[in-house]
Amino acid sequence: HRKEMTLRWLSTQLWRHRVMGLLMALCVTLLLMLLATQSLNPNGYTFMRTRRSPPPVAFLKTHKTGSSTVQNLMFRLGEKENLTFAFPYYAYQFSYPDRFRADFVDELPPGSSQFDMLCSHMRLDLGQLKQVMPKNTIYITLLRDPLQTFESVFSYYTSTVPAFTLAKKAADTANRKSALSVFLEAPESYWDPTEPGNGLARNPMSFDLGLSSQEWNASWPMELTQLEEAFQLVMIAEHFDESLVLLGALLQLEPEELAYVHLNVRAPSDITPLEEDTKARLWAWNSLDVLLYNLFLQVFWEKAEQYGLGRLKREVALLRASTQRLRQKCVARGGVPPGELEDLVRPWQTDTVTILGYEVRGNLTLQEEGLCVRLVLPELQYHTHLYFQQYGHDMRSIPTD
């Protein structure tokens, strides 16, 4: 029962300092005892090793595309290599939905000469981001089928995006169709483009990438060209393993370093089935995201062909084998409801959806446990741990005045 007692004790300490919403100031000293003192071997980590100096990485974390899974991979890589993270000055995001500014980033910690990794939510401003990251930074992001992205965004942010909240109230009053269907029947009647909180209510991926998400304008061709030139890799969620292989080639990673579990996954009951008329309305309402996705899907396969499709297929098989081995080692149960999870590994829950998590196996060595907990550790807990490890104090809450 050592593991159960340890996790329960750590969870109690970790969540003792909850504050409103996502703004938690956590006491992580005991978490560090579990997560930051392991020796590096196939089953653990250490921070007393010669780092191989991977190139700096900026991962633009897009909403509801599978980006939490990629972020976890980046967190694990950065922690293992003792990289310096560019963290938000306040909380977990770079003052989203404001357009990114260099002064949103916390200061360099003592002893660091540059930021090596950035992977928190932002609305992109490429010029400002380049002021923060070194010149040799590799820029990556992730896009997903626009229909599935918007359905997920709507579901997850129903209670926080004003346009979605209005549609939900109308659907509750009508007591007939889903809130998503009600919204799509007349989206302009719920969507106020001047409301800052409505950024995700139309073309959310375009909004995250800093593009005009309301309508096509003359600046789009130039801005798309700039994005294509700046991002060495735009990953595609529908080809996730292939994307990870190309990422591994950019960062010189082994298949074992790319192994993952899907994080921030909703319960199946919270996923709205899309009928044909709903799909048509989704395409029309998110036409700029459709354009964005189709462009970078083509670019993705061009890069895949340059890599070699046969080689890519072989590397995907190796990645899947490594992922399966790690999951078998680490995961006792997947798709676990939040009420059955320890606080340490329980994902953040919204008012409108249930986010599932993972139960880590028992009978692991301390080294294996350190690896496996990291593999399933949700964003907020992992971010908090890394921030405390880098700066020696808790994250700052967003000022309320």
Image (tube, rainbow, N blue to C red):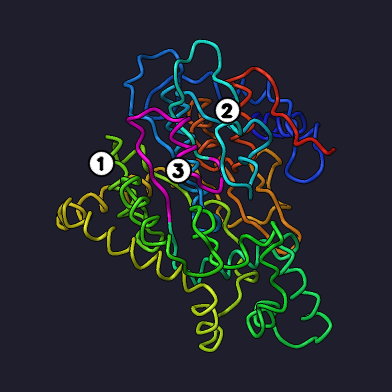
Q: Is residue 81 above or below residue 360?
A: above
The answer to whether the residue labelled 1 contacts the one labelled 3, judged by CB atoms less than 8 Å apart, is: no
Q: Is residue 116 above or below residue 357?
A: above
Residue at 28% over, 64% down: 298
Q: Secondary structure at mark 2?
A: helix
Q: Nearer the viewer, residue 140 or 347?
A: 140
Residue behind mark 3: 126
Badge 1: residue crowd in 10 Å (few <14, some 14–19, many ≥20): few
Residue behind mark 2: 386
Which span of residues is magenta-colored?
120-142
Q: Position of residue 364 (x, y in %)?
A: 52, 33
Residue behind mark 1: 249
Residue at 61% over, 61% down: 200
Amino acid type at mark 3? Leu
Q: Secondary structure at mark 3?
A: helix
Cα separation between marks 2 and 3: 25 Å
Q: Is residue 53 above or below residue 14?
A: above
Q: Nearer the viewer, residue 95 or 45?
A: 95
Amino acid type at mark 2? Leu
Residue at 81% over, 43% down: 20
Nearer the viewer's eye, disc 2 or disc 3? 3
Determine the image quadrant of residue 53: top left
Instruction: Report if residue 8 is visible in the image.
Output: yes
- Quadrant, the C terminus: top right
Badge 3: residue crowd in 10 Å (few <14, some 14–19, many ≥20): some
Nearer the viewer's eye, disc 1 or disc 3? 3
Q: Position of residue 236 (x, y in %)?
A: 37, 58
